[in-house]
Amino acid sequence: DVKVTQSSRYLVKRTGEKVFLECVQDMDHENMFWYRQDPGLGLRLIYFSYDVKMKEKGDIPEGYSVSREKKERFSLILESASTNQTSMYLCASSVAGTGRETQYFGPGTRLLVL
Amino acid sequence: QKEVEQNSGPLSVPEGAIASLNCTYSDRGSQSFFWYRQYSGKSPELIMSIYSNGDKEDGRFTAQLNKASQYVSLLIRDSQPSDSATYLCAVSNTDKLIFGTGTRLQVFP
């Protein structure tokens, strides 16, 4: 079974703090993704990575950065957390290919920024 | 215009009925289509994928794709209360997925 794990299920941070969200997958997947999910807005892609040390901006990268130093690990960084970054953050992974590959999601991190 | 559109619902159906969930998309170059189920407080999980026009059946689930009309649907036969969840339509022509906002399905006994 594919397993995608995220470092925290719930996180409470203060405005201005630097926040690290970590994601690890155990299936040797090339592709990894970070989404945020908000009511009425659905899942929106923040950043994705097709390979180690490679990153691409998604639809809403502002205020975020990412790091992929190892194939199995993809970190999302909020440089200076703001209240509008309160959200559910979901990590996903998939094999590389033709676009037909399933994305497998982690359990999510619910982040509250006060 | 949103790239992937779904009716937010809720769609309420009685137990044993057929639930029909619909999705339209704007990018004619889209090649792959997915239906994910998301229970409240949980992460999405894949139910069905479809790539060619027509129907694809898997147990109680049938996905239908019409690329000319840019329309994909999910039918759930013999709906059960355990099917109550939000169903997300996702569309891709690369390794990236574009998600709809989801349709909430409620199956009542």
Image (tube, helix red, strand yellow):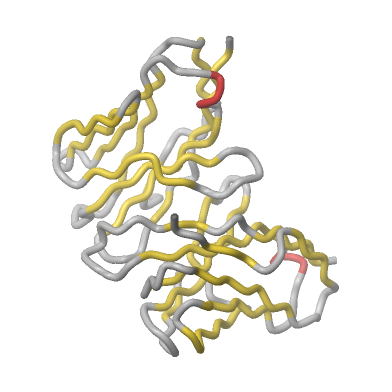
Q: Is residue A111 above or below residue B107?
A: below
- Asked where in the image residue A40 lies, by quadrant, the reply is top right
Q: Is residue B67 above or below residue A70?
A: above
From the viewer's perspective, tell me whether residue A96 is left or right of residue A58.
left
Q: Is residue B74 above or below residue B18?
A: below
Q: Nearer the viewer, residue A18 or B9?
A: A18
Query: How many marks do you count on the picture?
Result: 0
User: Where is residue A68 shown, x and y percent of the image?
Assistant: 50, 84
User: Where is residue A70 shown, x and y percent of the image?
Assistant: 49, 85
From the viewer's perspective, tell me whether residue A8 is left or right of residue A105.
right
Furthest-front residue in this view: A1
From the viewer's perspective, tell me whether residue A82 is left or right of residue B60.
right
Residue, x 31% and y 32% (percent of image)? Answer: B73
Residue, x 45% and y 18% (percent of image)? Answer: B79
User: Where is residue B107 shown, x and y percent of the image?
Assistant: 54, 18
User: Where is residue B1 shown, x and y percent of the image?
Assistant: 38, 50
Task: Quadrant for the C terminus of chain B, please.
Answer: top right
Q: Nearer the viewer, residue B84 or B20?
A: B84
Residue, x 58% and y 55% (percent of image)? Answer: A37
